[in-house]
Image (cartoon, rainbow, N blue to C red):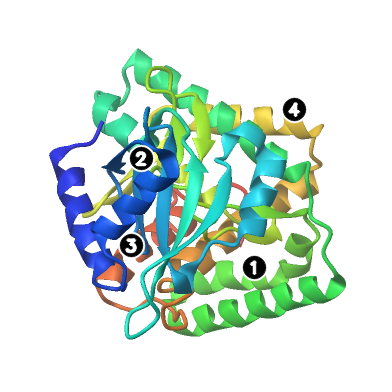
Amino acid sequence: MATRYSEYSAVVEIDAFFQKTSATRSGCDARARELTGGKVVPVEVQGVCSYSVYAGPELEYVVQFRLESLALKTEVTSLATEIYGSLVPTVSFEGKVGEDGEKEPVYVYLMSRLRGMTHLDFILAHGFPEHSLDNLSCRRNLIGDIAHFMALSWKAPRPVSSEYRDTLRQTYVRDLRLLQAALPSRFRSIIQTCLNSIDDILSLPIVLLHRDFGSCNIIVDETTCHLVGVVDWAEAEICPFGMNLHSLQSLTGKLHLRNGWTRFEDYDALQDVFWERFKQEVGGLSGDQLRTIKLARALGLLLSSGFTSRLGNEPRPVPIGDDEHGRYNMMSLDGFLINPQTKFDGLEY
């Protein structure tokens, strides 16, 4: 249920995408029809590094065309299916469109379609008034389902070598020291706390982690807001559990571009639902485990919002600066790490 704004944005994003590739939109649409034997309709919200369409006689597939430099790791999508089952789409690689040359071709992926709507579109269609009984119920439904989703990864830790853990440790320490030098002094204490806790964080289960767990990638039931599934696993990583839990703040509060983050009035109740459901699903947590998960949440926020884009075909990320992009990210850092009214619980520094 897209708005005029999202439709306009999709047109702009699609045009921008095809400036980067030797493939044409008509060529991609033809390939989608060939693969699915049906009609083709662009997805309402497009990514910056891909072009996606619904396709098939009943629009039962998604065909995604990704820049060659940002090809999907099919072993990751297969692992996601193994862990999360029907909560993630199945994915198959179907060749490429376009020629090698000055501009890169695109790789083609055929995916099953998760029926529902993005959480963003659900909010646009049903999200007001924010505290109606229906919306209170919908938020509770979704946060409970997401606790179940997160528990699936906790219960499926990946076997990794000590060398892999050492590499993660070196990367996290390096990035935290960069942030310690670059961010305002008010963040130094929490950064030091994360540095001091690295070994504890790396003792958590090492899991497959969705690194863009936002409203555009969460698919929900159009009526109840129960979780249908999660899409776009392109940036997924194998790393300590909890490092994407900061994403849940956008489901339990909202960002105002002038005033920063505020919590919904049912924020505390939603946190209780999440943690009680999660602990029940994983068979309980010790106090030390819960504390370490919450430190991993802070570490994940720092490494995500503290740096410029981490897309694989872009320049090496650097700490955010005093510009428009930096200001937006700084609101999240301040909101969840500094502001007493909205900062994460479980942080002692």
> Circle 1 — which element?
helix
Which disc number belongs to residue 193? 1
Q: Is residue 139 left or right of residue 296?
A: left
Residue, disc 2: 54
| Residue nearer the viewer, 91 or 150 | 91
Q: Which tag, 1 or 4, sits closer to the chain's start?
A: 1
Badge 4 amino acid: Gln
Q: Is residue 158 left or right of residue 316?
A: right
Query: Label 4: which residue?
Result: 280
The picture quadrant where one finds residue 278 is top right
Q: Which mark is residue 48?
A: 3
Q: Secondary structure at mark 2?
A: strand
| C-alpha separation, residue under disc 1 versus residue under disc 4 | 29 Å
Specify the quadrant of the image occupied by residue 144: top right
What's the distance in space between the residues labelled 2 and 4, CA to CA?
A: 37 Å
In percent of width and height, residue 63 lies at: 42, 48
Task: Look at label 3 and name its amino acid.
Answer: Val
Q: Position of residue 40 (x, y in %)?
A: 30, 41
Considering only order in the chain, which callout, 2 or 3, is on the residue closer to the N terminus? 3
The front one of 15 and 240 is: 15
Which tag, 3 or 4, sits closer to the chain's start? 3
Question: Which residue type carries mark 1?
Answer: Thr
